[in-house]
Image (spheres, helix red, strand yellow):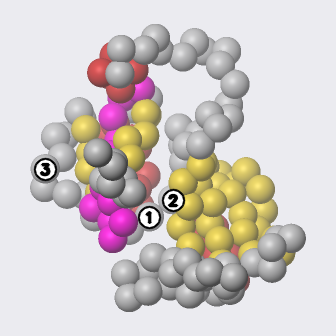
Amino acid sequence: MAIPQRFSLVTLGVADVEAATAFYRRLGWREAPSSVDGDIAFFATPGGVLALWETAELAKDAALPTMHANAPGFRAVALAINLASREEVDDAVGDWVLAGGSISKAAAETEWGGYSGYVADPDGNLWELAHNPSWPLDERGLPVLRGT
């Protein structure tokens, strides 16, 4: 049996679901009606669902220990939003910071011919905001991967 090549949901562990939900709302994201106030928040996107859930509850659900307070800040995961231009990347970075997020790496030209920067939400979840001129965006805003 082959496992489908897709993801349905990404769950970010957060310290405070209400505060994290408020941050994503400030970005202009609309919360799904299936959210449970203060417990779990869902945001439908063109590519899958983003969920916000308390870190300890997520760890418990996965039968893993919760990370200790001195755990490294980098979690070896970054989500990404591709945008149509460098200007859109700069605008998105600015809006991210205005909503209460932070910049991890300022947007700049990349070695692969694009433009990209990294931002973090208030819980340290890392997002790349990028423009890749080799990957046009489809009508849903998702990159179209083409062979070389």
| Residue located beneath label 2 in the image | 99
Where, quadrant-wise, is the N terminus in this rendering?
top left
Dots 2 and 1: beta carbons under 8 Å? Answer: yes
Residue 38 vs 35, above or below: the answer is above
Foreground pick, 147 / 138: 147
Total labels drawn: 3
Left or right of 106: which side holds 5?
left
| Residue located beneath label 1 in the image | 27
Residue at the right extreme, as displayed: 111
Question: Which quadrant of the view contains residue 58?
Answer: top left
Visible residue check, residue 145: yes
Visible residue check, residue 9: no
Foreground pick, 6 / 40: 6
Magenta stretch prevailing secondary structure: strand
Q: Amino acid at mark 2?
A: Ala
The crowd level at tag 2 (other Cα within 10 Å; few <14, some 14-19, many 20+) is some
Q: Amino acid at mark 1?
A: Leu
Residue 85 position, x and y percent, is 64, 86
Q: Amino acid at mark 3?
A: Ser
Callout 3 secondary element: loop
Q: Which mark is drawn over residue 34? A: 3
Region of the chain picked out in magenta, as a range: 44-55
Q: Which mark is drawn over residue 74? A: none
Name the N-terminal-most of marks 2 and 3: 3
Which residue corresponds to the image point at 80% horizontal and 73% vertical from the top-left?
112
Name the N-terminal-most of marks 1 and 3: 1
Left or right of 16: which side holds 136?
right
